[in-house]
Amino acid sequence: MSTDQRDDGRAGDVQGPTVPRMLVGIQLHRFREVAGITPDQAAYEIRASRSKISRMENGLVRFKERDVTDLLTLYGVTDEKTRSGLVTLTRQANTPGWWSKYGDIMADWFEAYLGLETAASVIRTFELQFVHGLFQTEDYARAVTMLGHTSAPAQEIDRRVSLRLKRQDLLNGPTPPQVWSVLDEGALRRPVGGPAVMRAQLERLVEMSKLRHVTIQVVPFSRGGHAAAGGSFTVLRFSEPEVPDVVYIEQLTSALYLDKREDVDHYLEVMNHLSTEALTPTQSAKFITEIIRDT
Amino acid sequence: MTDVSSTPGEPDAAAGTGIDTTVPHSARIWNYWLGGKDNYAVDREAGDQFSAIYPGIVDIARADRAFLGRVVRFLAGEAGVRQFLDVGTGLPTADNTHQVAQSVAPESQIVYVDNDPLVLTHARALLTSSPEGSTHYVDANMADPAKVLLEAGKWLDLTQPVGLTFMGVLGHVTNHDEARAIVTGLLDGLASGSYLAINDSVNTSEALEEALRVYEASGAVPYRTRSVEQFAGYFDGLELVEPGVVLVADWRPDPSADRGPEIPQMGGVGRKP
């Protein structure tokens, strides 16, 4: 498909290893299916587990070049151009992202998210409790971090906060993603870090909402019973037509990544209901401004 | 309680979302044919069923977007138009009207008109303007030209020329006389020197007609083609811009682009004297 079919107008620059990983995974999956080989057979070939094959095909792990070429041979892919194309992509997939130096404080499941966030062209989030990490002020980020790591030494808290702020560079880059955030009113009312910190955070939100690539919508309490029965979630979209949307749901000690079409459909539907039920971006900015005025 | 006063064109707070995910939805199917990701299983099934009968529909969807691009570039460029009224916005895709217009003239002002809640939600979030220009969204049915003009007039200076576009949307109006009345009703409210641009399917392909019949039977909002004469009639009383009312592929084609397969899709641009 030609680039003019992209649905976001972003240039085709690849940021970080995540999308190459997904592309390698998608192709390995396709070749395996065409060859009629089971995940177990594939796992046996590279002396790995069945779940490793699944994680490879979902683009969630680093690839050994040797594993990729062995699998291609097993799948009967002999065309030199196809093979070398995939090897090149594998090498890109193994280039570390900017976040790799934070590996000591970061769980693998979150590292995977940062990769996706960095590569996404549209990030849609629904937040029930907190303001999204990409919009947090330093003080608010510190307060949230301390809630989650009560016994961590000050130095570790600093590093966690610095990682969160570093993530926000994404919004200042030359081709920032479109960040479309729907917040429950609760996330605006809960005074994380105290009233002063919260007030500054709300002011930041209003500022952010003026950016062309940022959309903020509020679901007020008055519109009860909204569509997200569960909790906060994020839908990440990528420019590449063949890379599916990924739904990210953070839990206490792990995260869920969904990219099966029926799962994505469901979350996309809920997200669409929420965004449609929420105040419009213009109304939302007014709403937040009035909360600031009232506090 | 925080007061949220209503802004023109913003939805009624008490209304439901109005999104029905149980029947195919034309904007989502269109998005599917264009290779987008904003569609559900019900849309993909309907889209596949359609293209099984008439595979050219995917070419029509692409030709429609390409025509929009060439027309808006012409209007913002050669014709010097700085205000656009885009009726039947659809879900955001590549090269939306404001992106094309503002790439030529960043100060261009665009009003998008649609009455579909899903489309409006996406438009408000994603069809955002360059800092020099503006984009606004009107929640109105095109069948009510007076309301469209009233709302659009809040953002556009209707004493100055406007580029009025209907890209693959007039077929949603089943009765041709009504479609004509919509076009005329809107043009009547625009200044001399305004332009009308339309592309739509014509009834020269039996396979397309059959696919549209099956589509309508699925519960989707029907879409009707017009005869070539009916299509040309939309431009009555206007000065046609070269090359006139033609197959979209022949309307000022991009010399570097492939002409594409033959499709029963016509387009034209006319200037209001």
Image: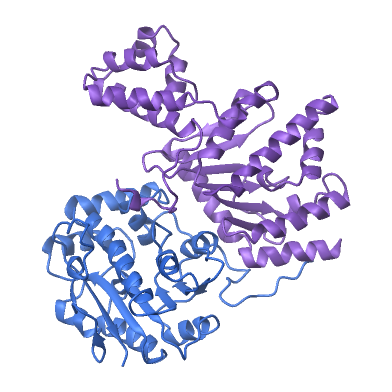
Asked whether residue B223 is in view, the answer is yes
Q: Quadrant of the C terminus of chain B?
A: bottom left
Give me the chain that's purple: A
Residue A215 placed where, x, y %? Answer: 60, 57
Please give left or right for residue A239 compared with residue A169 in the image: left
Residue B9 against residue B128 in the figure, above or below: below
Residue shown at the point (59%, 44%) measured from the top left? A170
Residue A141 placed where, x, y %? Answer: 76, 41
Name the residue nearer the viewer: A135 or B18.
Answer: A135
Which quadrant of the figure has residue A290?
A: bottom right
Asked whether residue A220 is in view, the answer is no
Residue shown at the point (39%, 11%) measured from the top left? A43
Q: Quadrant of the N terminus of chain B?
A: bottom right
Residue B251 placed where, x, y %? Answer: 21, 71
Which quadrant of the figure has residue A279?
A: bottom right
Name the residue nearer the viewer: A151 or B24.
Answer: A151
Residue B231 against residue A211 in the figure, above or below: below
Residue B206 against residue A136 in the figure, above or below: below
* Chain B: drawing colour: blue
Which quadrant of the figure has residue A45?
A: top left
Residue A275 placed where, x, y %? Answer: 57, 57
Specify how the rendered protein is coloured.
Answer: by chain
Question: How many callouts does the rendering have?
Answer: 0
Residue A292 against residue A96 in the figure, above or below: below
